[in-house]
Image: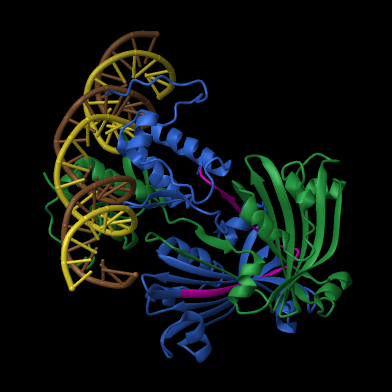
Chain colours: A green, B blue, C brown, D yellow
Amino acid sequence: MKNTRAVTDTESVSMPRYREIHDALREKIITGVWPPGFKLPSEPELAKSFDCARMTLSKALGALAERGFITRRRRAGTIVNAPRPQETVLAIHDIEAEISAAGHEYQYLCLSREARLATPGDAAALNVPIETPVLFLHGVHRADSRPHALEERVINLAAVPDARQERFTKSSPGRWLLTRIPWTEAEHQISALNASAAIAECLEIARNKACLCIERRTWLKDRSITYVRLLYPCDQHKLTARFRHGKA
Amino acid sequence: MKNTRAVTDTESVSMPRYREIHDALREKIITGVWPPGFKLPSEPELAKSFDCARMTLSKALGALAERGFITRRRRAGTIVNAPRPQETVLAIHDIEAEISAAGHEYQYLCLSREARLATPGDAAALNVPIETPVLFLHGVHRADSRPHALEERVINLAAVPDARQERFTKSSPGRWLLTRIPWTEAEHQISALNASAAIAECLEIARNKACLCIERRTWLKDRSITYVRLLYPCDQHKLTARFRHGKA
DNA sequence: AATAGTATCATGTCTAGTCATATTAGCAAG
DNA sequence: CTTGCTAATATGACTAGACATGATACTATT
């Protein structure tokens, strides 16, 4: 059978068939017509009811499964999953882009830079053996010459030897790494803390002011690349994350 | 041609062919052999070099494209993308599960409950017209009878009429909603703040102590379901998120 | 030289079928 | 009642080929 379907009235812009099917099935699930635990009809049956090839249908089911709506098991069939714990995608941009996007002038100010063998603290942060060569960096990100965030970073020089040549006096190490070094895995920890005297001074805020703390560790295939701790004064930054089931 | 390939020595457990291909191509990209901007060979060429059908190869490319490694455009071909801004998946469990998982005894204590027409504040939080019927809830989550988090919630009764019947004196509204009401979209905002006197009293912490603040809005297909603001004392909670390119 | 029309080509989608494999149900033996 | 075998079955992977679509490159015209 050739692809001779008409564009139905509900799809103003022609969607691929598999996406139509995907959306139709998703509808059944999120409206509760097919409740959690419900076993859907077999692929051949569904394919027949949608008047398409089994592979087209399978593609739709595959997408639903990838998004966690259903579980497909051979022989057992396909069943509707219980609603997931909330999940959300957090995009963490580099600070320079963030500040520029907000229409402010960006500036990085290096407070200290030291190439050294990993101290116990460095080793724990980076998750590397002690005495691995690392680069320790401490600096402030500024927006319109006011402190915006404090950065403390450890770079694994064994994994990123080029960093030894970089001075990082004016350009932020975040962007430098981001554009040069690929990564496969990242871990973030987000917390709050009261500014210590030292932190307060660097950020020009009152002592004890609440700060948002983002810690990030990045790996390239089991190889630790960098650890960074970013501190934002509470009234200067807010992380936002949006998550949409399906669509994008 | 039938599927007569031998299991190669690098794949101890037989992986699907398309995943093998996916991983092989990903390798080229993350090691920089194919740098950003590089145009890959055409699908028929790659299919030939991997000795598979074009569709199998296309499936591998499709997965890479979905993960943001490449961009595929008709006629133009497929090109390697620049590294993405860091993205991470944040799983936000309901607090009851969180506390139970940590081996503590969970308890929810309702501080106030009021069904009312949306005040301007409620309307802004929920993103609904003013005077929509809403349920306002204020309560404390406790772990081993010590305060763990403060919750302030507004539920859209027009979208969740059943909530009117619920007392929420002991069971947390979060879990109740999570298990009953499906959702399609969620937005999170994460920030830090200093505890006000009222907050400090509810959480039994010192005034001004830094707290992690999570605000969440949930929709079911353009229909606002609930808004919630959770406050965690800084030393009691840390959000963690991990992201792996590829694999799962 | 600028522009409009056209040919071409790479990806996008789909089909109808084959073979592979995990899992279950049912049955038989202990 | 339990254990282990066997057959049935639903999904998983794959193929070879067809047509659709959109972007580009080329060509002819003004």
Quarter-of-image position of residue A235: bottom right
Report x, y in % for residue A157.
77, 45
Q: Position of residue A216 (x, y in %)?
A: 69, 56
Q: Nearer the viewer, residue A115 or A188?
A: A115
- Say which of B102 and A245 sits in front: A245
Give the side of residue A73 with respect to residue A154, left or right. left
Span shown in magenta: B226-246
Q: Is A27 placed left or right of A129 in the picture?
A: left
From the top left corner, tell me how far across and down residue A244 is, in percent: 43, 64
Rendered location of residue A212, percent (x, y): 71, 69
Vertical position of residue A95 compared to residue A165: above or below = below
> In percent of the image, x 56 and y 62: which residue is there?
A90
Nearer the observer, A62 or B231: A62
Q: Measuring 25% from the left and 41% from the top, which residue is drawn there?
A: A55
Q: Nearer the viewer, residue B189 or B209?
A: B189
- Left/right of residue D6 with respect to residue B188 in the rendered view: left
**What residue is rendered at 66% in x and 74% in y?**
A237
Identify the residue at image location x=88%, y=73%. A197
Q: Is residue B9 left or right of residue A208?
A: left
Pick the quarter of the image with the N terminus of chain A: top left
Please say whether residue B241 is one of the residues in the magenta stretch: yes
Evaluate whether residue B151 shows in this view: no
Q: Is residue B133 magenta?
A: no
